[in-house]
Amino acid sequence: MELSEVARKFVVHWGEMGNAWGVNRTVAQIHALLFFHGRPLHAEEIADTLTVARSNVSTSLKELQNWNLIRVAHVLGDRRDYFETSVDVWELFRTIVRERKEREFDPTVRVLGELVADPSFQTEAADTQDRVREALRFMDTLGAWSEEMLRLSPTTLEKVLKLGASVQKFVRGSDGRD
């Protein structure tokens, strides 16, 4: 498939942003291609379109499946696996937040909790104990907030985000400072 200039810019930029977020560029580009076109594509078509090795596409598709960002689809009369992603940006946002929370955030909360619960933690300096407990409290609060946000419907979540921006402007006042 030949990419339009708009599609090419989108896919290239998404790959660059993925790289900035710690995601392999090809993984992000494949996701961008699937999102932009909004229809299932098979691995060979993806490899040809992005001019990347078929093995790289295969590895990248597995990574996207592990992140629950794509799913396998089948086309009648075709034995190949096709891959598609949600075209709902809110669903994608929620999936990414949920997956990152499970992979990155939750393990840190567990370790901090284990540290605080360890009897030898009491031998650390008082200010060190305070910092670690404050980090745990902060992360527990942020985790509870994110869980609540993930439960909201996209419409309600959008309203909460807009309301939050309005509250911030109000709190900062007319001069724009905190």
Image (cartoon, rainbow, N blue to C red):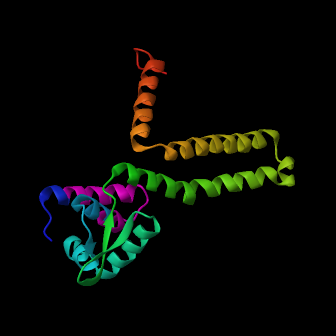
Which residue occupies 40% across, 67% down? 64
* Image x and y of residue 105, in percent: 58, 53
Q: Residue at x 77, y 38 (%)?
A: 127
Q: Is residue 41 left or right of residue 71?
A: left
Based on the picture, tell me whether residue 28 belongs to the magenta stretch.
yes
Q: Residue at x 43, y 35 (%)?
A: 161
* Residue reaching furthest to the front: 76
Q: Could you say where residue 116 lies in the image, as x and y percent from the top left?
A: 78, 49
From the viewer's perspective, is residue 104 above or below residue 74? above
The residue under the point 34% across, 81% down is 55
Quadrant in which residue 78 is drawn: bottom left
Q: Which residues are magenta?
A: 9-30
Q: Position of residue 99 (x, y in %)?
A: 50, 58
The secondary structure making up most of the magenta span is helix
Choose between 148 and 122: the one closer to the eye.
148
Residue 96 vertical placement versus 140 (above, below): below
In the image, residue 132 above or below residue 104 = above
Quarter of the picture holding the N terminus: bottom left
Give the percent coordinates (x, y) of residue 112.
71, 51
Q: Quadrant of residue 96?
A: bottom left
Image height of 120 relative to 54, above or below: above
Quick check: 67 left or right of 131? left
Q: How many marks?
A: 0
Q: Front-most of 38 and 133?
A: 38
